[in-house]
Image (cartoon, rainbow, N blue to C red):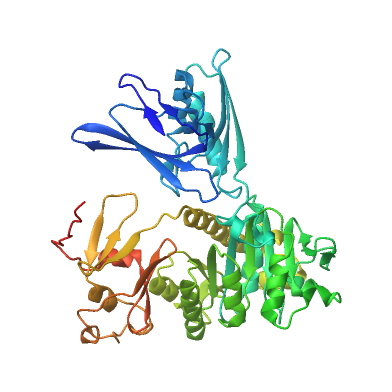
Amino acid sequence: MQILHAPSSPHLSIHSSKAPHFKLGSISCVTVRSSPLFVVHFSLQSQRDQRLSWTLHKRVIFSSSAARAASVEVGDSSVSTGTAEDDVLKALSQIIDPDFGTDIVTCGFVKDLQIDEAQGEVSFRLELTTPACPIKDVFEQKANEVVAMLPWVKNVKVTMSAQPARPIYAEQLPAGLQTISNIVAVSSCKGGVGKSTVAVNLAYTLADMGARVGIFDADVYGPSLPTMVSPENRLLVMNAEKRTIIPTEFLGVKLVSFGFAGQGRAIMRGPMVSGVINQLLTTTEWGELDYLIIDMPPGTGDIQLTLCQIVPLTAAVIVTTPQKLSFIDVAKGVRMFSKLKVPCVAVVENMCHFDADGKRYYPFGRGSGSQVVQQFGIPHLFDLPIRPTLSASGDSGTPEVVADPQGEVSKIFQNLGVCVVQQCAKIRQQVSTAVTYDKSIKAIKVKVPDSEEEFFLHPATVRRNDRSAQSVDEWTGEQKLQYGDVPEDIEPEEIRPMGNYAVSITWPDGFNQIAPYDQLQTMERLVDVFQPTVQA
């Protein structure tokens, strides 16, 4: 690979003996000894999606059609564009994606850019990460506005689309799951807290946002889906030729539940319940889905572990109630997901309160949901009130968000849907704080993303600041872990990320600490840390 450039030219030529396809990832600029340095990141579109990057010095400006986030055939002699295209891309680069903190050109959203400068016509496509993007209308409006402001533009045509549904490691998955972008578990680890109600209403909220959605009811012993929705076809059908299961549908959402098996249980053979779940989930013809919502069975036993091991869960939503007992069970569930490297992105506290006589009452107490948020660093908490209509809709076969789309409960689920969409997109981009242990200096290193900030923490300091129930009484706040209980020379055995908001640290005594990134930034830092350099 050879990169050629002239200091006076804004164009870039790339020559290669081969012709792989490259796609622009991002462009960044730094200053080295008062000289501008542009760094252009490409991604090689191969099975491994290996990333390659080249550094271009001086005044080299990347302005090829790859900057429109379209694939470029590198075998051509050169790649260059005109002033009109530069104007359009510069205008569009003013639009920032709030989730990624990057402009939509660098994000790779701009596709199929076509310009007729003589007629003043511009057309392009914005390919977002999901059709359920909560601000897709804002993107479309802003794109029209900024391009229309160019003096030579008379007509702008913007087409909205979404990336094809495909998980990150599709080739490693069973055939039935290879066309599903995000799999979200809704879990409670305790029965009777409204988990299935949350799962079903979340699924139909995402569908209303424009996503392709499916629901998998993983509770074989007590399936809830056949009661909560009422599809016309209430039986699963076996495709004898492909030996696959065809899901039933209701209002555009695909549904699979053991309760829809009816009398034809030959398709459900298996000596164990986990085997039945595996067969139902992986041999179903789901088709292309943006989100598959799994209504997890209560508990943290073999069935739950099997599900988490056979399914590449993108994220989990935790459902709880205000009671202390519910909190204890939920804490077990969060730790289970942590060990299985599944980030929990939101907590839903159901049956929080009701309003009567101009007052708000909390019949089951307060604080369980906020305790989960505080202890495990899950920043999104949603309170669901006690509403007779919410319970009634679960028995009627029509979800509450469908029966009353403008109601108070539906608005809460809309906010939950936005949260799930945004967090799944961030998780797929793997943008998180980097936390590692440097054994040479016996310090935990924290690198904040999208900045130059990094700092070091003493491992004993991190361990002493644990806020779990083993270290601090979750109700009184009394400190249970004393200063002297932690050896000064303690070292972590393993550190790994837990979603976008926390890191999981395993200590020599087997304790698994979940430390939110926000908490790490408030701890006492090591100063004047000496880092030995490695001689070349």
- Residue 92 is left or right of residue 471, and the answer is right
Give the answer, above or below, for where 494 lies relative to 410.
below
Name which residue lies at 44% across and 19% down: 83
Report the residue that reaches farthest toward the front.
17
Name which residue lies at 39% across and 41% down: 53
Q: Quadrant of the N terminus?
A: top left
**Picture quarter containing residue 483?**
bottom left
The answer to whether residue 393 is visible is no
Q: Position of residue 165 (x, y in %)?
A: 63, 51
Report the residue that reaches farthest toward the top.
118
The answer to whether residue 351 is visible is yes
Q: Position of residue 301 (x, y in %)?
A: 58, 83
- Residue 170 is left or right of residue 235, and the answer is left
Give the answer, above or below, for where 482 lies relative to 525.
below
Name which residue lies at 75% across and 57% down: 251
Name which residue lies at 69% across and 61% down: 176
35 or 467: nearer the eye? 35
- Residue 56 is left or right of residue 241, and the answer is left
**Picture quarter containing residue 405?**
bottom right
